Image: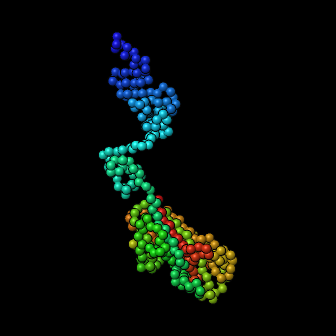
Amino acid sequence: MRNVNIIACFFLFGFAFSQNDKVGINTENPSAMLDIVTRANNDATKALEINNSSNIELLKVTNAGKVGINIGTNTPAAVLHINSEGIKNIRHQNLPVLNETDYTLPFNNLGVSSNGNAVGIPTTVKYLYYQNGNIFPVTYNTTNNTGGFSLSNTNQYINLPIRNDAGLKGNTIGMIFGTDTNATINGQAVSNVQYILIPEPGVYLFEFYGTARCNRFNNTQNYTFNGQIEVNTIFASASGTTYTTDTIFRGRLDGMRNDNGATGNTSYSLANPQTLTVAYQTTQANQKVALFFNYAGGDNGFSNNECYFNIPAGANFSYYFIISKL
């Protein structure tokens, strides 16, 4: 009689036993060793609840498949909702320990410390910032407008250097700097190209901003151009000392304009500053890249090296260059 009462109680509370030793709660056809089905079709209904000796809820599983651990009577707000107040929430044991430098793809910033605790590695933005605080080139004479570069020949390339000098404001990427005494770009000879080496493969964002102008050579020519000069800012990559264009951004110098864009009769000036933005991917270590500037077309009377990158009124640089690792 006792066994019959026990079996009757099991069925009264929704228990079912299958012939293959499976137990079902609120289901007559258990599909696992223990199969629990909730009674209500809403998020808060609990399929499983475990309490401690003080009747405090330790663990619960809801009808929506959410698991709550140490959250009291609250309904889990996520697939896994853990309240770690006063305790360690996750501990792993006997898992491989990753060094900080190993937290690259396919790994993310969640790792395991040497004592088995889950840890997060802080994300550090890797960048280079170079700001040229002087006119370029430094040989330019602002009194006589000599010693600069010409803008009249499409085969002449002017290297815009990024150097390890006072203009380097930050370099957490670890870019390496160097100079090619003799090189070529797009088949044209260039000298003293100051380049940078990208130390690690990856995707990088390059951003350049600067202003250029041309004045009356030796203060003796009164230009009367009415057109425009088209100019290129060029991002180039190199194999050895051979540079080739990767990206060109086209700008222009508007005729008879001063730094503020007002008309005049003595100079050309960039009404809109020259900019360049490049997303560049390299798959090899120590990829060499450099920046160049050259004449693209239009009025071409500036053949006497009277052009330069200037520092506009109110600014503190002639150009800047930012690199960030994506």
Inspect this view and state whether residue 261 appears. yes
**Camera-nearest residue between 149 and 175:** 175
The image quadrant where one finds the N terminus is top left
Inspect this view and state whether residue 64 appears. no
**Camera-nearest residue between 137 and 234:** 137
**Camera-nearest residue between 6 and 134:** 6
Q: Is residue 86 left or right of residue 137?
A: left
Q: Residue at x 54, y 81 (%)?
A: 149
> Would you identify the image quadrant in which residue 105 lies?
bottom left
Percent across and percent down for residue 5 are: 37, 14
Percent across and percent down for residue 118 are: 38, 47
Q: Is residue 43 above or below residue 184?
A: above
Q: Residue at x 62, y 87 (%)?
A: 219
Which residue occupies the extreme front position in the image?
A: 54
Q: Is residue 198 above or below residue 97?
A: below
**Camera-nearest residue between 221 and 273:** 273
Percent across and percent down for residue 180 are: 41, 77
Q: Is residue 208 left or right of residue 221?
A: left
Q: Is residue 165 above or below residue 43?
A: below
Q: Is residue 311 left or right of residue 159?
A: right
